[in-house]
Amino acid sequence: MDRNMLSLNLSTEDLLGMYRQMCLIREFEYGVLDCIKRGLIMGGPHLYVGEEAIAVGVCSTLRPSDYITSTHRGHGHCIAKGGQLKPMMAELFTKATGYCKGKGGTMHIADMDLGILGANGIVGAGLPIAVGAALSGRLKGKDWVVACFFGDGASNTGAFHEALNLAAVWKLPVLFICENNGYGMFSPLRMTTSVADVAERAHSYDIPGIVVDGNDVLAVREAALAAVGRARAGEGPTLIECKTYRHLGHFVGDPAVYRDDDEVAAWMRRDPIVRFRQFLVERALLAEDADRELRTEIQAEVEQAEAFALESPEPDPTELKADVYAPLKPVGAGL
């Protein structure tokens, strides 16, 4: 993690801001886990613990006018793009004050004003949406960039290949960000994918394919910064594969017994937040007291988000059909 800060266009304030965002994502996720254990949130969310460097590294290169598409493991992406904890937590509590008025839940948080086109419960579904958003910008004469987050499992779907092909043919400004945590649900990548690096597949579409350490936030930012530059210059998409590891199971409730203890321990030693904290401390950019104060502040933010969600009203049943964009017709009424 020894990078030239000038080449990454980062000030001390920027670095500490990125560190704060990574800590905020992790504390939010552990807050969600705690709420589930207490019976306040139903279901089994897919938590982003261990992958924070990717969302923060990529989104640190984006403008407010840029867009992202997300996945079932999308809380970190939303926070990194500017999502607020209170409406996010309220959405998980299925409350009316949530981002989607309590109708979306953990896998469908969206905020168009922030450029968050939505998380998605369908594996690979965000890929063609990202390409469509990029094409929309092209047609409107905008210079926005779209960052498309997806997992290694999604790289084996037809949507992945169709999206990369079309984006390459039309040179659309898309960053395809593969968060390769080594497992497609419970299956190790080596059992499902013929290539060791998903990034190799970029060559089929004549676009850059880059492998980076997804637990090094500065390495992720460096790769994303170059890809954003290419995209805005009209040179087309880039596939960035971020090698990472989720600390917890695929979803809350998954004991992850299919993973080897030594493998888990090795990855835990590469914790992205611990590594970035060490980087900052070694350069005298973060003092121990300041770090403790920051973590206390973040914990309070998460607690305030939980309190907000608890106090928020349930959705009004009369609003059931509001924001449903497809017309509801009785069976047999025709198209």
Image (cartoon, grey):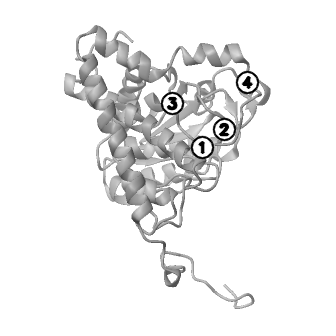
Q: Which residue is mark 2?
A: 250
Single out the residue that lies furthest toward the front.
Answer: 38
Would you name the residue on which mark 4 appears?
Answer: 259
Q: What's the residue type where badge 1 is placed?
A: His
The answer to whether any part of residue 98 appears in the image is no
Three-letter code for the amino acid on which mark 3 is drawn: Glu
Q: Are marks 3 and 4 in contact (CB under 8 Å)?
A: no
Q: Are marks 1 and 2 in contact (CB under 8 Å)?
A: yes
Residue at image point 60% right, 51% down: 125
Q: Residues within 10 Å of mark 2 (few under 14, many from 20)?
A: many
Q: Earlier in the sequence, mark 1 or mark 4?
A: 1
> Is residue 278 something that shows in the picture?
yes
Look at mark 3 in the image and give the residue it sits on: 51
Which residue is tagged 1? 46
User: Which image quarter is the C terminus in?
Assistant: bottom right
Q: Determine the secondary structure under disc 3.
A: loop
Crowding at label 1, few (<14), some or many (≥20) Cα neighbours within 10 Å?
Answer: many
Lateral position of residue 180 relative to residue 275, left or right:
right
In primary-sequence order, the first of circles 2 and 4 is 2
Which of 274 and 290 lies nearest the eye of the viewer? 290
Residue 164 place in picture, x, y as percent: 57, 40
Q: Earlier in the sequence, mark 3 or mark 4?
A: 3
Residue 312 x, y percent position in the rendering: 41, 66
Q: Is residue 51 above or below residue 63?
A: above
Three-letter amino acid code at disc 4? Arg
Q: Secondary structure at mark 4?
A: loop
The one nearer the camera, 154 or 229, is 154
Categorize mark 4 by other alpha carbons within 10 Å: few (<14), some (14-19), many (20+): some
Sort mark 3 into few (<14), some (14-19) or many (20+) by Cα contacts within 10 Å: many
Structural distance between the alpha carbons of marks 3 and 4: 17 Å
Quarter of the rendering containing residue 56 = top left
